[in-house]
Each structure stands twice: as structure tokens, then as C-alpha cells.
Image (cartoon, helix red, strand yellow):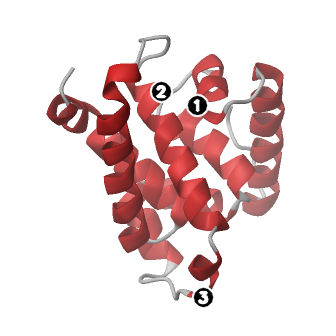
């Protein structure tokens, strides 16, 4: 598969993942570009053990984690408020969906990433485990805890 085909097929999903993970459009665009540069460099090494989407998501999550770990990131001012970032990343058709979306962006990264990958990227628990390099039980636990936090934040039942 050519890098252009990967971008066409998965580019929107990867950009959305980066926006949600980093909470900043400009940083997300940088992470998006870096993700596909890394994918292009590693394309020959891709063995097909996972789907291309899972492989790209793994690269994107690690790229975003690296950006969050770097010291200069904390000194940057976000380019947009969280509500605007939420609208860019996860368009919501109604006020309830918008509230869930904004609450999702306020979760810690360990819980936000599993919610985003499961609900917004449509990944199975096994794919999320591969993407995040975690055991499936850990993913399931984080998903359960994230749902509980969302429920507390929203003050209502959140459907699994």
C-alpha cells in the first residue's frame, strides 16, 4: 500500500485522534504529519500483523505521547478553547452528544484514549490493546473506569 493510499483511507481518523489526544489543532497537525512521515519510513517493515488503521493509530498515539512528554509543550498556550477543539475533533449532532464530547476531552489521557479509540474510531478492545501496547484486560478496565468518570462528570447514565 502506498502512503498516499493510507492518508486517503485513514487520514481523517488519524487527525481526529491527534486533535483529541493533544487538545490543540496546530500540534495535532504536526503530530499528523510526523505520524505519516514515520509510517512512510517504516512502510517496508509493516508485516500486516494488524490492520493498517491499527498500525497508524499506534504510531499516532506514540507520536502524541512523545509530544506531551516534551518540556516545551507545557509552556504553549492552546490555540483554541476546548469547546472549539471538541467541535473540530468530534462533531456532535445534539447537545447531549456535545456534552459527552466535551467531557471526553476532559478525561485524563489514559482514559480519553480508550474512549476515543473504542467509540469514535470504532476499534475493538483487541485492536486498542495492540495500538496502545497494553494487555486487553487493562484496556477493558480503563474503558470501564472512563465510562464511570464520564457518568460522574455528566451526572447521568452513559450507555456502554
- Write down the quadrant of residue 109 in the picture: bottom right
Q: Quadrant of residue 73?
A: bottom right
Determine whether, in the image, residue 89 is placed left or right of residue 73. Answer: left
- In the image, residue 57 lies at what x, y percent? 47, 37
**First-in-chain label (3 vs 2):** 2
Q: Nearer the viewer, residue 117 or 132?
A: 132
Tell me whether the residue at label 3 lies in contact with that at label 2, contact meaning CB atoms closer than 8 angstroms.
no
Task: Count numbered badges in the picture.
Answer: 3
Q: Return the residue at label 1.
A: 131
Distance, label 3 to label 1, CA atoms, is: 28 Å
Residue 17 visible in the snapshot: yes
Q: CA distance from mark 2 to mark 1?
A: 6 Å
Q: Nearer the viewer, residue 10 or 160?
A: 10
**Among the 4 quarters of the image, the one containing residue 157:** top right
The residue that mark 2 highlights is 54
Query: What's the residue at 65%, 77% (across, down)?
Result: 71
Residue denoted by label 3: 75
Q: Are dots 2 and 1 in contact, CB under 8 Å?
A: yes
Q: CA distance from mark 3 to mark 2?
A: 31 Å
Q: Earlier in the sequence, mark 3 or mark 1?
A: 3
Amino acid at each position: 500500500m502506498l502512503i498516499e493510499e493510507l492518508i486517503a483511507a485513514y487520514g481523517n481518523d488519524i487527525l481526529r485522534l491527534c486533535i483529541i489526544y493533544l487538545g490543540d489543532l496546530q500540534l495535532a497537525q504536526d503530530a499528523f504529519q510526523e505520524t505519516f512521515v514515520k509510517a512512510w519510513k517504516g512502510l517496508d517493515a509493516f508485516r500486516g500483523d494488524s490492520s493498517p488503521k491499527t498500525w497508524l493509530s499506534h504510531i499516532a498515539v506514540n507520536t502524541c505521547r512523545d509530544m506531551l512528554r516534551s518540556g516545551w509543550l507545557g509552556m504553549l498556550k492552546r490555540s483554541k478553547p476546548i469547546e472549539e477543539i471538541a467541535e473540530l475533533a468530534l462533531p456532535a449532532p445534539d447537545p447531549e452528544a456535545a456534552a459527552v464530547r466535551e467531557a471526553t476531552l476532559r478525561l485524563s489521557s489514559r482514559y480519553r484514549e480508550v474512549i476515543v479509540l473504542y467509540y469514535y474510531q470504532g476499534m475493538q478492545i483487541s485492536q486498542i490493546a495492540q495500538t496502545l501496547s497494553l494487555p486487553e484486560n487493562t484496556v477493558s478496565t480503563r474503558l470501564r473506569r472512563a465510562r464511570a468518570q464520564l457518568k460522574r462528570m455528566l451526572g447521568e447514565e452513559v450507555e456502554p
